[in-house]
Image (cartoon, coloured by chain):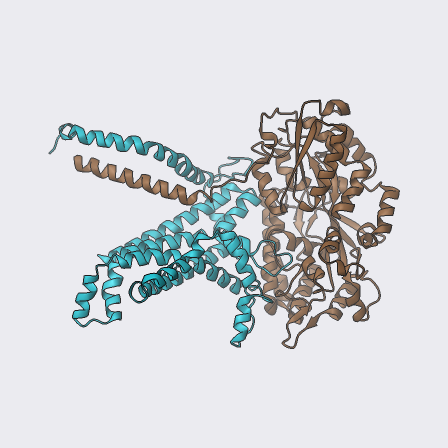
Chain colours: A cyan, B brown
């Protein structure tokens, strides 16, 4: 058995100097992270066990009451359902579309044209969400929206994108996929371009077609990148807020409907109803949902990769 | 050991990198609402007493040192009123200057929830006593000085205004303006449908709506007979439902027994069912539609024959739809209305509280109150404006629906309980869902009754949780 003290003594002085340097440069960042992220998160956990008002903290310890009440809360259940549906649809559609487009751009359209297409798809990522959503609100307008006009050209009836409960959710998904697609595309494209061409050339020599190469070479080697994209898209989708808030804001004069999602519900409970303890419990639920999904995705994709 | 230490260092480095990434990504989400331009009460605040301030001599109230008063409100259309009043006030007190901050009401409320507790709110805040009651409980707002309270309670204000501004048997804000509702109706559309009289009964409103709506060849509504409030954030949907419920003699929450401070949901009775059924039947029959413009925008674009709204729409029509002027009129709701009063408050931490109250006294003067309605369209809280108000009405007859009420007209004020906003907002969410499900609910009173009972149970549960249930 190795003596720990002796082991420490065996570490060369130069290595200790490196450790010291790493510790010195990282400490300020870690302290900031602790103060800005870890402490507030821990405080949210703490608040969730209290009847904690926005302007009247730690009023009464209520144990798990907030968590239990949430399970029976109609708004929370609706928000959970909508958010999950939104996250699943947005993740699946945006990752699949990005995968197809990336394969297209990596193998078929290259050069300047390929670059222009990449830029075109990435442009929505660069634009802030609020003006983008305001633009989409006009696109979705029942009467003069371009989407309904386009549908009319192919003989499809006008759709109440902003006023029907189901269509409003579809509208938010369309908007979000459009916004997320470029980011997913670029990440997957970089991953695809990193795959050595020799693999594809060898497969081609063996008689493998394009689909076979994509399925047996590209997809397996791209799995870590795909995992990253899926996890990031899922987390981002569960945190959806701005789109639904802006799509339904100032709707007194125009048709519009709020798609209740978890972050909106947290916001409403905390900052409108002043119930910070209750909102914190909801935030903890959201945290646990995302954590569980991330672990599942890691296990599933990493497991099948190994 | 060295391998373990190496792993620890790696983990530390990875963690730090993630921290940087997370902080970079999260920077916008963590952004707090900005403080006021002038710093509000946050800078070198000298806490003032929460006890009623006595009336200082006008010359002393603002002293001689340069002072900037920040006026905060939730209605941008009133900004010119504050600015004009500020300029007039500066002539009396040359050392005082003003900044005015306003944004949409919901954004303003969210800003107040963080600014008042952190002592960064404006020197003068304009909002309802009901909304600010939580901050009153926390001692964050000053009581109304005795001289203003005496002036307000002695004469010149409707009893409902005083009731709406009373919390814990005391007054904290000076009533500035009120938010009454009237029916706006397009006289051309009425005329085309053969309607000659203004809608003075609830049944007339229904009948006129059915006579004036229009549909296209596909059966889609192109002009609503009555632009109902069917969607929107916050509590507005429930508030409009409430106003119509008042026409049927019922209200959202009934104090049981009167004066007990205990409340019970009343909107799930037969009158509530009838009213909800009117909404969904209208949607089914195309009298109104969720797919067309609503509210003031619909009226201004001549896409609806009638709707209910506050008086601010009148100056908006003059600006946005001048061709409509002379082709519409207003009439008071048949039976009663909700009265909400926006009052002027001074935070406990306001650094120039005496001067703030002096400005509030100034805003109570008849000239400022008349200017309020002339510029913004909002109705002055003072009713004792006599000839000035008569002259205004003569020049602006479309205000008749707001200034002339039928005999026996009742004004209902918001229940003085902090959780009312939650009850109303949650009811609004349910109503929006219910209206969207009109195909299933139209012509089905049993289903409607079951829904309303379910929602009323939720309202009553919130009252129970807060110790205000009187069932």
From the top left corner, tell me how far across and down residue B262 is, in percent.
67, 44
Residue lying furthest left = A1
**Residue occupying the point 41% across, 34% down:** A35
Placement of B385 over or under A6, stated as above or below: below
Taking the image as shown, residue B272 lies to the left or right of residue B153, namely left
Q: Is residue B430 above or below residue B388?
A: below
In the displayed orientation, state which residue is furthest to the front. A112
Among the 4 quarters of the image, the one containing residue B197: bottom right
Q: Nearer the viewer, residue B201 or A248?
A: A248
Name above or below for residue A10 compared with residue A227. Answer: above
Report whether residue A73 is seen: no
Pick the residue in front: B286 or A78: B286
Q: Position of residue A141 (x, y in %)?
A: 57, 64
Residue B425 % position (x, y): 61, 51
Residue B385 visible in this rendered orientation of the protein: yes
The quarter of the image holding the N terminus of chain B is top left
> Could you say which is closer to the camera, residue A78 or residue A257?
A257
Locate residue B22, reporting x and y percent.
38, 43
* Relative horizontal placement of residue A20, taking residue B233 as reference (left or right): left
Q: Residue at x 63, y 60 (%)?
A: B230
């Amino acid at each position: 058995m190795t003596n720990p003290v002796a082991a420490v003594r065996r570490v060369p002085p130069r290595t200790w100097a490196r450790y010291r340097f790493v510790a010195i440069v990282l400490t300020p960042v870690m302290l900031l992270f602790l103060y800005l992220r870890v402490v507030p998160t821990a405080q949210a956990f703490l608040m969730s066990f209290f009847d904690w008002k926005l302007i009247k903290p730690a009023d009464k310890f209520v144990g798990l009451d907030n968590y239990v009440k949430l399970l029976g809360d109609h708004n929370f259940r609706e928000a959970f359902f909508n958010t999950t549906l939104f996250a699943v649809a947005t993740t699946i559609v945006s990752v699949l579309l990005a995968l197809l487009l990336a394969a297209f751009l990596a193998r078929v359209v290259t050069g300047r044209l390929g670059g222009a297409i990449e830029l075109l798809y990435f442009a929505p990522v660069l634009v802030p969400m609020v003006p983008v959503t305001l633009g989409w609100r006009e696109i979705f307008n029942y009467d003069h929206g371009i989407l309904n006009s386009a549908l009319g050209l192919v003989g499809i009836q006008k759709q109440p994108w902003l006023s029907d409960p189901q269509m409003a959710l579809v509208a938010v998904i369309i908007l979000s996929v459009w916004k997320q697609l470029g980011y997913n595309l670029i990440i997957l494209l970089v991953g695809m371009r990193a795959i050595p061409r020799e693999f594809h050339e060898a497969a081609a020599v063996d008689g493998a077609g394009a689909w076979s190469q994509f399925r047996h070479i590209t997809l397996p080697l791209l799995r870590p990148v795909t995992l990253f994209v899926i996890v990031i898209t899922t987390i981002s989708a569960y945190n959806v807020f701005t789109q639904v808030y802006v799509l339904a804001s100032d709707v007194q004069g125009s048709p519009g409907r709020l798609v209740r999602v978890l972050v909106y519900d947290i916001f409403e409970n905390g900052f409108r109803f002043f119930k910070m303890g209750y909102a914190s419990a909801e935030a903890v639920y959201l945290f646990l949902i995302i954590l569980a999904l991330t672990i599942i995705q890691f296990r599933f994709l990493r497991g099948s990769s190994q | 050991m060295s391998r373990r230490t190496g792993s620890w260092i790696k983990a530390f480095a990875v963690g730090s990198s993630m921290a940087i990434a997370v902080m970079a990504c999260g920077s916008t989400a963590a952004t707090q609402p900005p403080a006021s331009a002038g710093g509000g009460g946050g800078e070198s605040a000298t806490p003032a007493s929460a006890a009623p301030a006595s009336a200082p001599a006008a010359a002393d109230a603002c002293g001689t040192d340069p002072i900037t008063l920040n006026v905060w409100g939730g209605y941008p259309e009133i900004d010119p009123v504050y600015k004009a009043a500020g300029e007039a006030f500066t002539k009396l007190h040359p050392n005082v200057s003003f900044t005015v901050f306003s944004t949409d009401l919901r954004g303003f409320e969210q800003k107040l929830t963080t600014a008042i507790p952190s002592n960064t709110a404006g020197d003068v805040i304009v909002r309802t006593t009901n909304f600010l009651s939580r901050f009153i409980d926390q001692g964050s707002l000053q009581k109304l000085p005795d001289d203003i309270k005496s002036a307000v309670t002695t004469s010149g204000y409707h009893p409902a205004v005083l009731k709406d501004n009373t919390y814990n048997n005391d007054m904290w804000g000076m009533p500035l303006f009120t938010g009454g509702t009237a029916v706006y109706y397009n006289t051309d559309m009425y005329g085309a449908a053969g309607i000659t009289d203004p809608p003075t009964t609830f049944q007339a409103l229904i009948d006129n709506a059915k006579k004036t709506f229009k549909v296209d060849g596909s059966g889609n509504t192109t002009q609503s007979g009555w632009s109902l409030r069917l969607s929107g954030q916050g509590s507005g949907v429930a508030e409009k439902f409430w106003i119509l419920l008042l026409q049927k003699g019922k209200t959202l929450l009934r104090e049981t027994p009167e004066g007990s401070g205990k409340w019970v949901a009343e909107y799930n009775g037969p009158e509530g069912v009838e009213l909800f059924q009117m909404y969904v039947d209208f949607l089914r029959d195309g009298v109104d539609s969720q797919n067309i413009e609503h509210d003031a925008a619909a009226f201004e674009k001549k896409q609806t024959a009638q709707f209910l709204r506050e008086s601010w729409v009148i100056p908006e029509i003059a600006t946005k739809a001048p061709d409509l002027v002379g082709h519409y009129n207003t009439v008071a709701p048949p039976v009663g209305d909700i009265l909400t009063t926006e009052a002027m408050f001074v935070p406990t931490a306001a650094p120039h509280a005496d001067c703030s109250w002096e400005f509030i006294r100034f805003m109570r003067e008849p000239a400022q109150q008349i200017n309020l309605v002339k510029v913004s369209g909002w109705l002055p809280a003072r009713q004792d404006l006599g000839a000035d108000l008569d002259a205004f009405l003569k020049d602006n007859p479309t205000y008749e629906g707001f200034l002339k009420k039928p005999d026996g007209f009742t004004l209902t004020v918001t229940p003085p309980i902090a959780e009312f906003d939650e009850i109303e907002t949650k009811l609004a969410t349910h109503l929006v869902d219910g209206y969207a499900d009109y195909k299933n609910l139209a012509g089905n009173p049993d289903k409607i009754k079951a829904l309303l009972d379910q929602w009323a149970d939720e309202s009553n549960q919130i009252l129970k949780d807060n110790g205000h249930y009187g069932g």
